[in-house]
Amino acid sequence: MSFSKSYLSTKLDVVGIGNAIVDILIQVDDSFLKENNLKKGSMALLDEQKAKDLYYKFSAGLKTSGGSAANTLTGIAQLGGKSGFIGRVRNDELGKTFSKDIYNSGTIFNTPASEEGPSTARCMIFITPDAQRTMCTYLGASVLIEPEDLDFSLVENSKVVYLEGYLWDNSAAKRAFIKAAEVAKASGGEVALSLSDPFCVDRHRESFTELVTEYIDILFANESEIISLYQSHTFENALNELKNKCKISAITRGDKGSVILSKEDIININPYSFGKAIDTTGAGDIYAGGFLYGYTSGKDLKQCGKIGSICAGQIVTQLGPRSNTNLLELITNNL
């Protein structure tokens, strides 16, 4: 599905590049994880046959367009921002599910589906009663994004281009990232990056460090990821290493809230709670979405952090990464 070019008559707030994945959410108890040798809270990569077998078994689970960047972009759209997403799906059942769902969120998605090759990516997310998520992921077509797949009309017309660290495993996607960053900078935009996962950081520490220093204006990470990036012994040491590396950093710390770091200031943001946490899927993603919505709307950094924290505090009280609450009303009532 696509939007007409007339939609680009005004500047988009954020355009993201990332893995186009269909999330399939299933509530299970701890015994299921033990029976299937799954480590709670982990993310395991699957081959295509194993992914097909699991999907056949759990296809009745809640399906939603997913992937870290896609979650962030749809969060921005739910808040009333203008967002676009660039990612690769296959022309198959799950590819159509992804396209329809992200389209319905109000996010532009124009990347043509692959007609051959691996099937659409999917992530089986097993959620236990303690709200922990254990993921089994098949990346499929999502990692095949290349510079030629970029819609430069979206990149050039965005205030911020948002990059998902998970895609850094693929050399073609790396080239696409760098090209998008260059086009964004040349067009007067800014570049944001989510580090995505501490294991992803471990694999690409040197190139991530270089990317942050050379191209990134806004960095999103959690405490474990930023400690891993700079191989620090403490969070405070990691912040000292990060200071002055980029314009703004937003670091989430779970129930400790988050920290916004700029060249001028360090701002601590308290967490928000709106009920019992039942699913942490997409909490960091929608935090980034809330932050970027505030940032592109001209809010100060403390307000941006609070908006992100409010969004994250709400999303963990429900199943899945698409808010069933009016986020703008929630922000208005709590900011």
Image: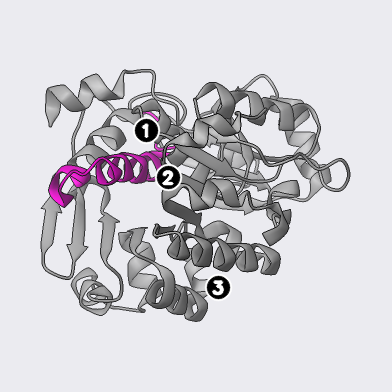
Circle 3 SS class: helix
Q: Which residues are magenta?
A: 278-305
Q: CA distance from mark 1 to mark 3?
A: 33 Å
Residue type at mark 1 is Gly
Residue type at mark 3 is Arg
Q: Residue 320 at what x, y percent from top left?
A: 47, 28
User: In this rendering, would 187 be left or right of 57?
Assistant: left
User: In this rendering, would 255 be left or right of 189?
Assistant: left
Q: Residue 9 at what x, y percent from top left?
A: 47, 35
Depth-wise, is mark 3 or mark 2 nearer the camera?
A: 2
Q: Residue 257 at what x, y percent from top left?
A: 20, 48
Q: Residue furthest right?
A: 116
Depth-wise, is mark 1 or mark 3 nearer the camera?
A: 1
Q: Residue 303 at what x, y percent from top left?
A: 15, 43
Residue highlighted by disc 3 = 203
Residue 287 among those drawn in magenta? yes
The dot on residue 81 is 1
Residue 2 among those drawn in magenta? no
Residue situated in front as seen by the camera: 131 or 281: 281
Residue situated in front as seen by the camera: 241 or 35: 241
User: In this rendering, would 231 be left or right of 8?
Assistant: left
Circle 1 SS class: loop
